[in-house]
């Protein structure tokens, strides 16, 4: 059963697991040690949710299982979030452009302006 990635990210322990997996692979035992007071079955259950959400993948090496962040899934979630943020950035970009135009207009004075007015 597929889990929505944002539902999976709703739990602080799962977010912490993703932080621990960022840029590296870890076994369940390594995660249990890093997390502290969380049992191995609980960590395994959190990893299962993250796998079902597509946020984590597993690589087997002999009897050991290495868990890692699925970069493509995280990039897709990030792109979706960026789509929410970008519409708010566009008006700010327009405001920055108008401010820059105003500053430029103050620096550049028209040539036909009388010298007496400029001296004031």
Image: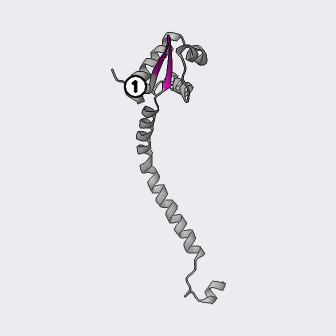
Residue 90 against residue 28 in the figure, above or below = below
Nearest the viewer among 87 and 22 is 22
Q: Which residue is mark 1?
A: 53
Residue 36 against residue 117 in the figure, above or below = above
Question: x, y percentage for residue 27?
Answer: 54, 16
Q: Residues within 10 Å of mark 1 (few under 14, many from 20)?
A: many
Tell me the quarter of the picture where residue 54 sits: top left
Is 62 magenta? The answer is yes
Q: Residue at x 42, y 22 (%)?
A: 51
Q: Residue at x 43, y 25 (%)?
A: 8
Nearest the viewer among 90 and 71 is 71
Tell me the magenta residue range: 58-68
**Label total for image:** 1
Q: Residue at x 55, y 30 (%)?
A: 23
Going by the image, does 83 lie left or right of 67? left
Residue 57 against residue 115 in the figure, above or below = above
Residue 84 against residue 28 in the figure, above or below = below
């Amino acid at each position: 059963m597929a889990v929505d990635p944002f539902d999976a990210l709703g739990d602080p322990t799962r977010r912490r697991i993703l932080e621990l997996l960022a840029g590296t692979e870890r076994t369940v035992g390594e995660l249990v040690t890093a997390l502290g007071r969380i049992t191995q079955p609980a960590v395994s259950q959190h990893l299962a949710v993250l796998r079902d959400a597509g946020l984590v993948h597993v690589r087997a090496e002999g009897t050991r299982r290495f868990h890692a962040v699925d970069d493509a899934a995280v990039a897709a979630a990030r792109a979706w979030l960026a789509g929410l943020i970008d519409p708010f950035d566009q008006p700010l970009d327009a405001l920055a452009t108008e401010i820059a135009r105003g500053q430029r207009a103050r620096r550049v004075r028209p040539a036909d302006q009388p010298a007496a007015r400029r001296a004031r």
